[in-house]
Image: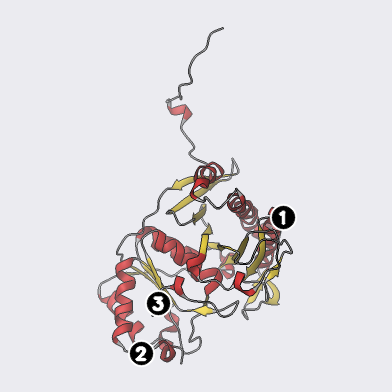
Amino acid sequence: MKILPYQPDQSGMAYSVGVTLDRFIKLKQSDFPFASGELSQLLRDIALAAKIVNRETNRAGLANIGGAFGQINVQGEEQQKLDVIANIRFMRALSKGGEVCAIVSEEEDAVIDLQNNSGKYVVAIDPLDGSSNIDVNISIGTIFSIYRRKTPIGSPIQEEDIMQPGSEQVAAGYVLYGSSTMLVYTTGFGVNGFTYEASLGEFFLSHPDIQAPKDGKIYSINEGLEKQWFSEIKKYIQTCKERYYSARYIGSLVADFHRNLLKGGIYLYPGTQKNPSGKLRLLYEANALAFIAEQAGAKASDGFQRILEIQPTSLHQRTPLFIGSDTMVDEVLRLIAKSNQSISAWNL
């Protein structure tokens, strides 16, 4: 019997398709000495739900699942049909996986107790960010945070399991449904991005060890709210214009953040006269992206402190957000500090 050692084929016909998300998660499982596979499985559950939402998003126009659902969610925003569908998909995936004891969702008024007291993790999620852009075929996304519960395994969930600052996250990520679908996540050991290959049904590592540029020339802000900005924000945006920076604002938080993370830039959603505490939610939007930003060498602040240091006091708490390249965020924070205003003044 003839035996030959395996030699990888180096011909052009046998190009490598890369490392799958599943294999990458298994390789990195040793980063968590306290875990025994539950966190890895939880990330796979999220990836599976993302694949299903990706399919639904791609066929929205054909299946008549675009447009408004006809109800208003707890945020006072009109729900889109795909908001509801995405919420159902992620809820179902997280409940069936067995690793999660509770879920906080943008689409739900209260904490969803999965009545799984053996679950080690709490997930906070915005199932479909930017869903109003679906009907015009613009990028949308999913944002998620993962926390370890504080109370003993086997006991009912308590408020302390839910109301944790962002610094307590064990993992966070987002899925971007765009010209290609990407899943980007961190477990506190750097940031990695995976692109979905639909023909194989797999996410493949495409952006290893993402590092945000220290500076940039892109600013992302809704300039339609300029009349309601505080003077420091007006001054910073005017400075950006005088430097001929590029204004880029999609209206989907995930898409705007993703572009600036890769190319260098800053995303700003300050408090305004109408929404003095900002509009973005702390638990399932700002915290996740702040964790990713810091792991990639960028910054995230509410103007007065790190986003990750804010102690949440309510489930759907809102916060101003300044997030992006280190140098650009620092410049905004210096302007705010010079104003000698307290956060109570900004919150009117």
Q: Residues within 10 Å of mark 2 (few under 14, many from 20)?
A: few
Is label 3 in a helix, a strand or a loop? loop
Q: Are marks 3 and 1 in contact (CB under 8 Å)?
A: no
Distance (Cα) linking label 3 and label 1 = 37 Å
Q: Position of residue 246 (x, y in %)?
A: 33, 68
Q: Amino acid at mark 1?
A: Lys
Q: Residue furthest left?
A: 243
Q: Amino acid at mark 2?
A: Gln
Is residue 110 in view?
yes
Q: Residue furthest top?
A: 1
> Residue 163's quadrant in the figure?
bottom right
Question: Height in image: 43 above or below 79?
Answer: above
Q: Amino acid at mark 3?
A: Gln
> Earlier along the polypeptide chain: callout 2 or callout 1?
1
Exactly how many numbered labels are in the figure?
3
Q: Which residue is mark 3?
A: 305
Question: Height in image: 277 above or below 157?
Answer: below
- Quarter of the image with the N terminus is top right
Residue at 37% across, 64% down: 298
Q: Which mark is residue 96?
A: 1
Q: Position of residue 106 (x, y in %)?
A: 62, 71
Q: Residues within 10 Å of mark 1 (few under 14, many from 20)?
A: few
Q: Position of residue 8 (x, y in %)?
A: 46, 25
> Earlier along the polypeptide chain: callout 3 or callout 1?
1
Distance (Cα) linking label 2 and label 3 = 14 Å
Is label 1 in a helix, a strand or a loop? helix
Q: Which residue is mark 2?
A: 341
